[in-house]
Image (cartoon, grey):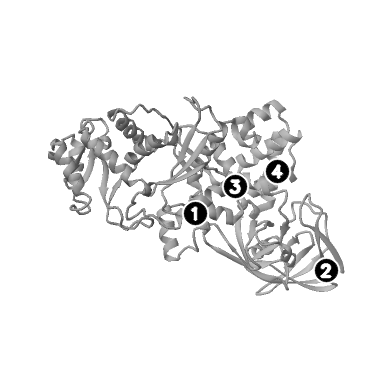
């Protein structure tokens, strides 16, 4: 907690000359919502840190902020810039090649955004190439993905000039495979998978490697008609003593009798990824290939094929490090199963972390792009918290999102001894809009969150936010309290949300699939469908219908 407080105190002091409690506290609570449980303790800790920070020189504040939280300096992405692409000689042509097992998710955004940013930077061209070769049992092609992928790219602002599908290119792969066989660079292998795995690990050539070109051509044709799935594969001839066993005589084509969702059973021999890319990158004339460093062996394979086939083709191959997003439980195969079974509502279910789900939650595409670009293009592995995306998005929507009260798991509250009073409660801290609440003389009824009941029991005196202070009388199934003489609003009086007893029930779908049920204040009826607002001290939400909201983030 100390580090979070200090970085926001440093930022506030750097911008305004002196750090202020009212400015720092909401930032801390936004990043650490659990600190709301002890506001008195939080205020004391923040004041302690403010006392330290406000004694520092501006130079010392800047130096510490650059070290502790450089992202809070809000340097523009354009100022950071992408590093220059090496080997630019004429038009830049790049490709983005997702496998269509479902919608593009947040993990895919890095490849999308970086390729898109580079072609825009160099006024080049981006090709969308759907990598729909036959998948596996765990990674199957989904028909919906052919629409979901372009839609996701469009939402994220990634522009492509053409779209190709590997399922349209089978004849080209067959032709190239035959050329490789004729150059004695490939052979048909009938070894069992486990046996060949042992051979490769030991660097032993299998008996089929020495087959004549004529035999290999004949056996290759039999793969289309005679052999069954698993009985034969086409392998490339590499050095069986190569230091990495994974590079030794890799499979480049195999038989699959699975029905393809786009071309049905028209084809039964399918290329492996690295072979198909050697054919397609050459065909397209891709100038720069940018992908994760975990795909380095694909670089080796493509270059090996081009060299052995005498192709005078040398695209620039670049890599980024592995990305890990803390706080995101994401599995595309699990999402596929859950969508198919109905466990998820669809690919826009928040648990898929797809572009469609982020849009549904009210995350702005500009925030996702900035989130990606903040990571840069280093080959170092990166681990970033999902809160970083939330911080960027919060900055983009905070100025326009109105505030409303929401009470989760509502408990009835009866307040006695009330004076006649009217309160104007602001809907935003800068937008001049408010809503009116009237306290009737005598007894008034409200609902408060079940979580706040324990707080009221502990504090005895508490404030219904922007309305009045109350003192606890008794706590049963209905909470009874009395009006307490208003004091100046200070931070040592805890504040809680409330709604009146006439307000409607709403459900909020969280990012983990949990649904929070509660009551929302009457004024929320003015929120338009699709609009993002803030349920105060709960989080930002996007309205889907009169009763349904989707949780955006804290």
Q: Which callout, 4 or 3, points to the residue nearer the camera? A: 3
Q: Mark 2: give few (<14), some (14-19) or many (20+) Cα within 10 Å.
A: some
Q: Residue 479 or 153: which is nearer the viewer?
A: 153
Q: Can residue 269 be seen in this view?
A: yes
Q: Which quadrant of the structure image shows residue 446?
A: bottom right
- In the image, what residue occupies the spot 56% across and 33% down? 123
Task: Tell whether 440 sits left or right of 512.
Answer: right
Compare marks 3 and 1 and give the one earlier in the sequence: 1
User: Gap between marks 1 and 2, in whole Å?
Assistant: 51 Å
Task: Select label 3 or label 1 by which is in front.
Answer: 1
Disc 3 target residue: 365
Residue 350 image offset from top left, x and y in percent: 53, 57
Numbered disc 2: secondary structure: strand
On the image, the x and y values in percent for residue 502 come to 73, 73
Residue occupying image coordinates x 20% and y 38%? 200
Q: How far apart are marks 1 and 4 (CA)?
A: 41 Å
Residue 148 has which mark? 1
Label annotation for residue 24: 4
If you read the primary sequence from the N terminus, does the residue marked by circle 4 or circle 2 appear first? Answer: 4
Q: How far apart are marks 2 and 3 (CA)?
A: 43 Å
Q: Which of marks 2 and 3 is nearer the N terminus?
A: 3
Asked whether the residues under the numbered discs 1 and 2 touch, taking CB atoms below 8 Å apart as contact, a structural biologist would say no
Q: Where is residue 479 in the image (x, y as percent from the top left)?
A: 70, 71
- Give the numbered dot on residue 439: 2
N-terminal of the pair, mark 1 or mark 2, is: 1
Gap between marks 3 and 1, in whole Å? 16 Å
């Amino acid at each position: 907690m100390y580090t979070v407080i200090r970085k926001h105190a440093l930022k506030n002091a750097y911008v305004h000359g002196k750090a202020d409690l009212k400015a720092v506290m909401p930032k801390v609570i936004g990043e650490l919502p659990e600190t709301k449980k002890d506001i008195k303790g939080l205020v004391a800790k923040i004041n302690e840190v403010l006392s330290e920070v406000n004694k520092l020189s501006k130079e010392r504040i800047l130096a510490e902020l650059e070290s502790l939280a450089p992202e809070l300096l809000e340097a523009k992405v354009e100022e950071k810039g992408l590093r220059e692409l090496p080997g630019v000689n004429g038009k830049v042509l790049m490709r983005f090649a997702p496998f269509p097992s479902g919608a593009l998710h947040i993990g895919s955004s890095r490849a999308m955004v970086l390729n898109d940013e580079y072609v825009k930077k160099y006024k080049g061209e981006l090709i969308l190439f759907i990598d729909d070769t036959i998948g596996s049992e765990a990674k199957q092609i989904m028909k919906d993905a052919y629409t979901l992928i372009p839609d996701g790219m469009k939402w994220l602002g990634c522009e492509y000039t053409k779209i190709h599908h590997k399922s349209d290119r089978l004849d080209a792969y067959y032709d190239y495979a035959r050329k490789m066989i004729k150059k004695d660079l490939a052979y048909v292998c009938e070894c069992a998978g486990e046996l060949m795995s042992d051979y490769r690990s030991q660097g032993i050539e299998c008996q089929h490697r020495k087959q004549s070109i004529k035999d290999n051509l004949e056996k290759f044709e039999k793969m289309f008609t005679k052999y069954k799935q698993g009985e034969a594969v086409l392998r490339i001839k590499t050095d069986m003593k190569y230091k990495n066993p994974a590079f030794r005589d890799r499979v480049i084509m195999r038989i699959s009798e699975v029905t393809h969702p786009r071309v049905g059973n028209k084809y039964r021999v399918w290329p492996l990824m690295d072979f198909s890319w050697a054919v397609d990158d050459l065909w397209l004339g891709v100038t720069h290939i940018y992908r994760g460093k975990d795909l380095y062996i694909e670089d080796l394979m493509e270059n090996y094929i081009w060299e052995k086939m005498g192709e005078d083709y040398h695209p620039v191959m670049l890599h980024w490090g592995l990305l890990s997003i803390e706080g995101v439980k994401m599995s595309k195969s699990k999402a596929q199963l859950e969508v198919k079974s109905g466990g998820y509502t669809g690919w826009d279910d928040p648990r898929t972390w797809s572009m469609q789900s982020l849009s549904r939650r009210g995350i702005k595409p500009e925030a996702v792009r900035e989130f990606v670009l903040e990571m840069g293009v280093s080959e170092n592995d990166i681990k970033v918290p999902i809160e970083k995306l939330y911080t960027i998005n919060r900055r983009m929507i905070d100025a326009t999102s109105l505030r409303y009260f929401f009470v989760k798991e509502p408990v009835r509250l009866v307040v006695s001894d009330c004076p006649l009073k009217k309160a104007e409660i602001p809907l935003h801290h800068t937008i001049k809009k408010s809503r009116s609440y009237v306290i009737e003389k005598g007894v008034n009824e409200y609902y408060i969150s079940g979580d706040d009941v324990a707080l009221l029991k502990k504090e005895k005196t508490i404030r219904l936010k922007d309305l009045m202070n109350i003192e606890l009388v008794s706590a049963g199934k209905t909470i009874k309290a009395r009006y307490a003489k208003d004091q100046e609003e200070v931070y040592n009086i805890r504040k809680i949300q409330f709604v009146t007893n006439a307000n409607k029930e709403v459900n909020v779908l969280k990012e983990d699939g949990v649904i929070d049920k509660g009551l929302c204040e009457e004024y929320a009826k003015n929120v338009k469908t699709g609009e993002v607002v803030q349920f105060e001290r709960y989080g930002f939400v996007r309205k889907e219908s009169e009763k349904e909201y989707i949780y955006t983030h804290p």
